[in-house]
Amino acid sequence: MSWVRSRQGIVTIVALLILVVYPLVMPRFWVLSIGSYSIILGIAALSLVFMSGYGGMVSLAQAALAGFAAYMLALATLAPSTNATGSAIGFGLPALAGAVIAVVLTTALGALFGAISARSYGTYFLMLTLALAVGFFYIVLQNYEIFGGHIGFAGILGPTGQPRANPEVFYYICLATATAVYLGLRYIVRSQLGLTFQGVRDNPRRMAALGYRVAAHRIALFAIAGFVAGLSGVLGAWYRGNISPGIVDLSRTIDVLIIAVIGGLGYPIGAFVGAVVFVLMDVFASSISLFGFSFDERFNTLIGVGFVVIVLVAPDGLVGLANRAWQSATHRGGGRRRAVDPLAAEAGLLAAPMPATSIAPSEPAGDGTPSNK
Amino acid sequence: MTFGTAAEVSAPALRLQGVGRRFGALQALHDVSMEVAAGERRAILGPNGAGKTTLFNVVAGDFLPTSGSVELFGKDVTSLTPYARTRLGVCRTYQTSQLFMGLTVAQSLFLAIRGVQRGRFDPRRPKADDPARAHSNEVAETVGLTSVLQSPVGSLSHGQQRQLEVGMALAGKPRLLMLDEPAAGLSRTERVVLTELLQRLPRDITVILVEHDMDVALAVADRVTVMAEGTPIVEGNPSEIQANRTVQDIYLGHAVGVHHG
């Protein structure tokens, strides 16, 4: 395969090698709290990047979907009668069975969210998904019978027990899941279905005129993104061992968006790059001091400043910045974008670029001037 | 492709009865009744604001009429969605190109072909021997885009984008092809190429054409409908229309003077 010798092929292979060797050489804290946690957040951000990049749908409901999966996992796997109000709840299923149920239900909820929001675009879509996310937060916060209210659930065990017991194994579970999701989405993007998503992204009206039920395709995209967010939620629940409404609150919703923007909304791999940066900032903010000013307890300031700088300096995120730096360094058609081509043969594995996405639905210029992006 | 029963085949491609469309206080279409026979080439002329594009949108289903009924191939489609009408065989182009700027020409044509076929939700990659691929190459050939098949749509020239606009409509195997000012913004040479392309279309495709360029419209059309203020005022063959005093007064005065002395 020719991509093995291409730049992207080499980057991919080196990156995968590093990721595989990583837990063998790094301390336990780096394996679990930075490595695994970054991957989990990255999968959640990937679900957003996928929706926005390939469907033009910037959803704020992805953290809620991930949280829903975590709750469903808890209900499926915890032993009965662990409920805060004492009523019997929980089915005591094995961890993997619970994970399957949680992800399937989350996919269905993604489809439901899609059915509610599929006919709205741009800012209205953003607000509808935000409303769904906030609504779900208040449901879990106030409902004690099923969701355990503000207490939530504790004692959720993964297939290998507590992640702390086997950090490397848990890391590899996360890495394998992320790789499978990444490759799966790459495949879908280049499929017939994926092409329809991109058509809907670029021009929903034309898609309808070509014979497509646009809303149905947007619902399908939301369901797929729900599946991905669900996987992140299951891994996150295993990682923490306990869940509470805090995992679906507004700041989590915003975290997912920040991660996606830092990495680059147009690049699937950016979700993971953004997650690593986010987690490193989160962990090490307290140990950074600039000109005698300590960032202890000022993680939000740091990430906020980082976010603003990224949006102003590199709207296509760190991956976009790296891509442009590479292109100008090698003098290869500076700034040239490679078109996404599902029908074309193999291309690189990492950093597959997509056309820039915006919050607003794209309206092709049709005033007689050819528009060149 | 099936063409339905004998009764449906003999039915007109399009029949409008008393169609009206109101946008608030604006009556964009008023009591439009017309029939376009199967296989006919119909040009719709009229000054700006005559309701030509609104008429297209009502026939394609983008807007529902506020009164009257729309029949396609003998079937009442008044309340049918745009995608359902496309699957019945209505394909259209737009006055301002409605393209997929992030996709390539080949992908755009592939989507246009698949839109009226099964497998719209197929999560697999199209196979190398998928007939839709060969078909999209044929359509690209027809509209002269073979050399830019793998180029992003956003990088095409305006003329090429207009060619793709027509190509995507043709790719959907239309029984009724509706072209909204296909020559808009084209150079003189490109107009000649477009006219020849339209003249070559097989007669099992009915064509309705909105066009300001008389050379294109009258070279293609069998019959012409002239609209003004939201309603058809004259219908006839091209020579009758050119000779019609009313038409000259309201619309063709300048055009006839310039192009045909």
Image: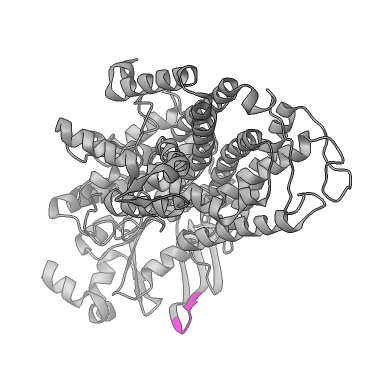
A266 or B170, which lies in front?
A: A266
Q: Is residue B25 magenta?
A: yes
SS majority, magenta: strand
Which residues lie in the magenta part?
Answer: B20-26
Q: Is residue A190 magenta?
A: no
- The quadrant holding residue B171 is top left
Count of labels shown?
0
x, y percent for residue A155: 74, 36
Left or right of residue A363, residue B143 in this image: left
Decide if residue B61 is in sight here: yes
Left or right of residue A323, residue B77 in this image: right
x, y percent for residue B163: 27, 47
Decide if residue B113 is in sight here: no
Left or right of residue A222, residue A339 in this image: left
Residue that sits furthest to the bottom in the current view: B25
x, y percent for residue B79: 59, 63
